[in-house]
């Protein structure tokens, strides 16, 4: 069950609550984001009286389906002025984020490549265009056009094409600074479920980070990755402080073994003479999938930078049907390991499509 207002890091797995995007203007004001799609939350839309389905049936194009007004200091407004340099009437790619908790919202998952902008000058600025130094002249109104220029990302699912990512990630919590780099990469590559968990080599104070105290911070990092990739579907995020409890009580419900292949990443150990120690783990391309007509689904477990604790944690995962894989003998930073493993996981899952 999704929490509605705040994050609670409990002893059992807890889905992460997401706040609305209204506070996203606070994120990344000091850095330039290269956004391939401007994303909004459904709460930001000035919704028209007609529903999306009604608009699609009528085909009306006299007025926009909906509009979004962004304040002058919003990072998206600044990006459109400074980086894109757009003027009134110019078009851009836009979309509305699909939260795990509001998939029933008819405006969730809108996609368009033809949204148009209108600058609304404020204060002493009279010209409705970016200033000479690239600053926004005021707030910004973005108009979302009528179908067929706007469509729902879920339409492909309705037509039998499931675009939900086939890969999920179980990640032993890295340092908060490193986690802030990893989260945009994870949503950019695409995952269905993201499990942030404790492990024997994870300091407990990592869970006290502001990333978990303020849900909008974590959400903003995931939205940043979505904006880069052009996708609109946020992953389902869960936080658990007790790995053993999650593996024993929650794992099978979230990732049934007959539907999801489970792999655990751990570096291959060598002794002082360079000989491999223990059983040889597989490479990602060598993992075994059950023979089935269903699309391949994969759960990847990535440990802390020091690796999973041997033999306790490795044996615990093996007992739950995890196949051990490796990227080699090098001990990688968590961000490098996550990007490499997710890329390989998507590749092996796509082979059945």
Image (spheres, helix red, strand yellow):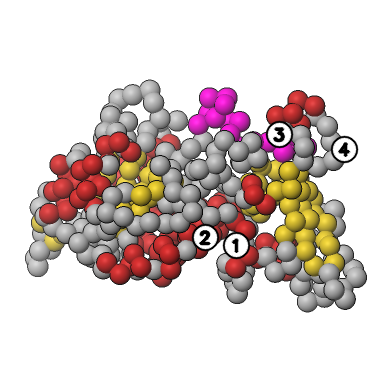
Q: Check disc 2: other Cα within 10 Å, few if <14, some if 14-19, many if 20+.
A: many
Tag 2, which secondary structure? Answer: helix
Q: Residues within 10 Å of mark 3 (few under 14, many from 20)?
A: many
Decide which of tag 1 and tag 3 comes sooner along the chain.
Answer: 1
The quarter of the rendered structure image containing the N terminus is: top left
Q: CA distance from mark 3 to mark 2?
A: 27 Å
Q: Which residue is mark 3?
A: 52
Tell me the number on the disc at residue 23: 1
Disc on the earlier residue, 3 or 2: 3
| Residue shown at the point (20%, 43%) measured from the top left | 248
* Vertical placement of residue 93 versus 172, above or below: above
Read off the magenta span.
Answer: 145-162
Q: Which residue is mark 2?
A: 216
The residue sitting at the top extreme is 293
Dot 1 lies on which element?
helix
Q: In the rendering, at what x and y percent does residue 318 appear?
A: 17, 44
- The part of the image, by quadrant, that contains residue 134 is bottom right
Q: Nearer the viewer, residue 71 or 32?
A: 71
Q: CA distance from mark 4 to mark 3?
A: 15 Å
Residues at badges 1 and 2 in contact (C-beta under 8 Å)?
A: yes
Which numbered disc, 2 or 4, marks the residue that appears first in the sequence? 4
Q: Looking at the rendered structure, which numbered label has been put on residue 62? A: 4
Q: Nearer the viewer, residue 124 or 149?
A: 124
Q: Quadrant of residue 261?
A: top left
Mark yes or no: residue 301 visible. Answer: no
The nearer-to-camera label among 4 and 1 is 1
Residue neighbourhood size for the residue with mark 4, other residues' Cα within 10 Å, grouped as few (<14), some (14–19), many (≥20):
few
The CA span between labels 4 and 1 is 32 Å
């Amino acid at each position: 069950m999704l929490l509605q207002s705040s994050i609670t890091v409990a002893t059992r797995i807890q889905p992460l609550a997401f706040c609305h995007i209204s506070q996203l203007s606070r994120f990344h004001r000091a850095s330039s984001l290269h956004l391939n799609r401007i994303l909004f939350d459904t709460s930001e839309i000035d919704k028209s009286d007609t529903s999306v389905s009604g608009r699609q049936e009528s085909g009306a194009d006299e007025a926009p389906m909906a509009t979004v007004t962004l304040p002058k200091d919003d990072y998206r407004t600044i990006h459109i002025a400074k980086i894109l340099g757009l003027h009134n009437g110019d078009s851009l790619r836009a979309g509305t984020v699909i939260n795990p908790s509001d998939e029933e919202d008819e405006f969730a998952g809108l996609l368009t490549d033809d949204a148009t902008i209108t600058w609304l000058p404020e204060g002493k600025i009279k010209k409705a265009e970016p200033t000479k130094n690239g600053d926004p002249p005021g707030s910004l109104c973005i108009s979302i056009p009528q179908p067929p220029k706007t469509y729902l990302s879920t339409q492909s699912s309705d037509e039998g094409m499931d675009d939900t990512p086939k890969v999920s990630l179980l990640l032993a919590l890295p340092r908060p600074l490193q986690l802030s780099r990893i989260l945009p990469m994870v949503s950019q590559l695409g995952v269905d479920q993201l499990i942030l968990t404790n492990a024997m080599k994870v300091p407990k104070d990592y869970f006290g980070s502001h990333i978990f105290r303020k849900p909008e911070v974590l959400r903003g990092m995931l939205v940043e990755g979505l904006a880069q990739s052009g996708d609109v579907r946020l992953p389902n995020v869960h936080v658990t402080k007790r790995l053993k409890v999650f593996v024993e009580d929650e794992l099978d419900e979230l990732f049934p073994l007959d539907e999801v292949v489970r792999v655990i990443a751990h570096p291959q150990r060598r002794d002082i003479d360079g000989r491999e120690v223990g059983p040889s783990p597989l490479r990602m391309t060598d993992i075994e999938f059950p023979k089935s007509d269903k699309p391949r689904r994969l759960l990847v477990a990535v440990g802390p930078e020091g690796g999973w604790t041997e033999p306790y944690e490795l044996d615990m995962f093996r007992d739950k049907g995890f196949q051990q894989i490796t990227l080699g003998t090098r001990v990688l930073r968590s961000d490098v390991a996550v990007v490499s493993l997710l890329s390989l996981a998507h590749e092996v899952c796509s082979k059945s499509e």
